[in-house]
Image (cartoon, rainbow, N blue to C red):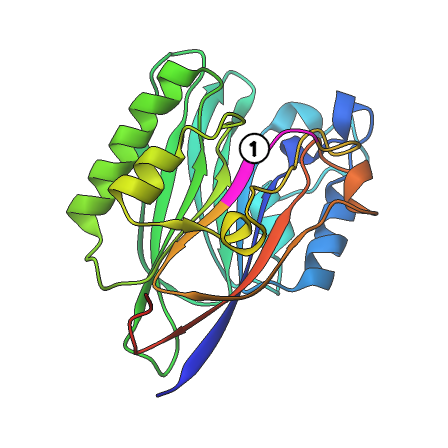
Amino acid sequence: MSETSIKVLTYNIHKGFSMGNRRFVLHDIRDSLRQINADIVFLQEIHGEKPISNGRFDDWPTNNQFEFLADEVWQHHAYGKNAIYKAGHHGNAILSKYPFIEWENIDVSIMKKASRSLLHGTILIPDSKTKIHIICIHLGLFERERENQLVTLARRINSHIPADEPLIIAGDFNDWRGNAERHLREDLGLKEVFKSTYGAHARTFPAWLPMLSMDRIYYRGFKIQQCNNLSGQPWRRMSDHTPLFAELIFSDEKFK
């Protein structure tokens, strides 16, 4: 039986700006992500297109933000719009060292002014027949909105992901009350990395003094090797969220 380690990181990058939009920090984010060197990076609030900023910032990238962050480290990436406006759009992105078999962006918007989506990709580890499903998520701000989006997520998983295929769901759940547990743990049999390891979700917002548990990494079909809330420097001076990192282990044996 062979085991494979998968290092994942989830991060709401706040469109590349520091808290309060005081500084453009996308270059710092790229440098910091490279130091962590995760295999799969789940990103929220990332610009796919925003040409209006090109003239305002000398260091604004000439390509879109997810390609700028991916560069030569993560050769495979997927992007899904979930907020479209006159000056461009932003959404979720997944950067991966492993090739995608397929990916799809699923619209879960409830309100026109608060567009949301689920970015569902499937990757194949080289020299392995195991498919891993990865879903990048950014849920709405209102509880009723999130409830509807979680129902859609559950339906997507039940209809598109076989129960014996590994699954990782990561992102900004905006679920500071912990109500998502009923759908993800009880209905779908998923576990959350930090709650499984430490008995509580990681506090990730606001970055300068994290008080609320907004960001999560849920999993099925893995064992936890390690996990870390990256709440120190340099992360606390970049986005308004702190990133979460986890190293997960999977094999051809089903984990209980």
Position of the N terminus, as image quadrant, is: bottom left
Position of the C terminus, as image quadrant, is: bottom left
| Percent of width and height locating residue 96 | 49, 60
| Percent of width and height locating residue 26 | 73, 41
Task: Specify the principal SS of the magenta part.
Answer: loop
Residue under label 1: 214
In the image, residue 203 above or below residue 121? above
> What segment is highlighted magenta in the picture?
211-216
- Residue at image coords 77%, 38%: 238
In the image, residue 78 above or below residue 56? below
| Callout 1 amino acid | Met
From the viewer's perspective, is 74 left or right of 253? right
From the viewer's perspective, is 140 left or right of 203? left
Considering depth in this image, is 142 or 254 the residue closer to the camera?
Answer: 254
- Residue at image coords 30%, 72%: 130
Q: Can residue 232 be spotted in the picture? A: yes
In the image, residue 125 above or below residue 21? below
